[in-house]
Image: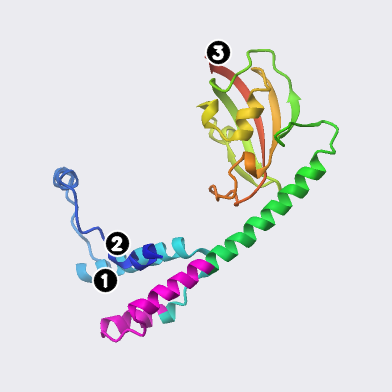
Amino acid sequence: MKKLALILALALPLVMTAQQKDEQEKAPQKTYKPSAKLKTLQDSVSYAVGLDVYQNLKQNMGDFGINFDIFVKAIGDAQKEKPGYTTEQMQQVFQAYQAEQQRLYNIKVEKNLAEGRKFLEENKNNKSVIVTESGLQYKVIKEGTGKKPDINSTVKCHYTGTLIDGTKFDSSHDRNQPITMPLNQLIKGWGEGLQLMKEGATYMFYIPNELAYGQQQAGIIPPGAAIVFEVELLEVVENQK
């Protein structure tokens, strides 16, 4: 929780590197224009710091939330040099918060693991779905006729990734830009699944969490989640057998 305790101290960067100072001096200077409500630079800086602190708090506290009436009171108490907590008590509070966050995280992980196992157990009963020894499930949408990659290959692919409830979290199609990546730098489910494909093929991968991102949060992908990818292998860019 040291990060939270340092938010106020980090709200404004007070030290610039020599390079940053040089860049600032070379950049066109903009004249500060006070807003109608904030007539001095000091007031504007104070307001900007408040916004920055709130944004950091929101990002770091997540769903736990902050009681802002108490938060403002604590700032006032500190300004009056009459804090309601000693440093030791603050550390105890932060430790309790970390423990509670970990408990809530564990509950979320267990829920996602259970939902993923149920989904994959039901999905494997689909006659078109093939299950590998590792637990990866895949379905052939279209077979290819070109080269097959190996684990040392670099591949060019189009893909769409979704959660098991159908929520889309990423798509190269939406960006109209396929990815080109070494196979051994991709998640295990992709690394295994793509080696089953030939250029021109399109497969659906149903990937258990241990072959995806494990019990870590990855963007909007929840911790412990099974995920689904539709992958088109466009080209084996390199094949270093």
Determine whether label 3 and label 2 are within 8 Å by CB.
no
Q: Percent from the top left, x then y, of residue 198?
A: 66, 18
Crowding near the residue tagged with mark 2, few <14, some 14–19, many ≥20 C-alpha atoms within 10 Å: some
Distance between the alpha carbons at the discs numbered 3 and 1: 67 Å
Q: Position of residue 45 (x, y in %)?
A: 25, 66
As helix, strand or loop, the secondary structure at mark 3 comes to loop
Residue plotted at (58% across, 43% down): 213
Residue 201 visible here: yes
Give amino acid for label 2: Leu
Would you name the residue on which mark 2 appears? 10
Which sits earlier in the primary sequence, circle 3 or circle 1? 1
Confirm whether the magenta stretch covers residue 178.
no
Q: Main secondary structure of the magenta part?
A: helix
Residue stretch in magenta: 71-99
Q: Residue at x 42, y 81 (%)?
A: 70
Which mark's residue is nearer the viewer, 3 or 2?
3
Could you tell me which residue is drawn at 33 percent across and 77 percent down? 87
Marks 2,1: beta carbons within 8 A: no
Residue at which label 3 appears: 241
89 inside magenta stretch: yes
Q: Which color mode does the image show? A: rainbow
3 vs 1, front mark: 3
Q: Nearer the N terminus, badge 2 or badge 1?
A: 2
Left or right: 231 as drawn, with respect to 138: left
User: Dot 3, crowdedness within 10 Å: few (<14), some or many (≥20)?
Assistant: few
Q: Secondary structure at mark 1?
A: loop
N-term-proximal mark, 3 vs 2: 2
Q: Nearer the viewer, mark 2 or mark 1?
A: 2
Circle 3: residue type: Lys
Residue 40 seen in this snapshot: no
Mark 1 Cα shell of 10 Å, populated few (<14), some (14-19), many (≥20): some
Residue 38 badge = 1
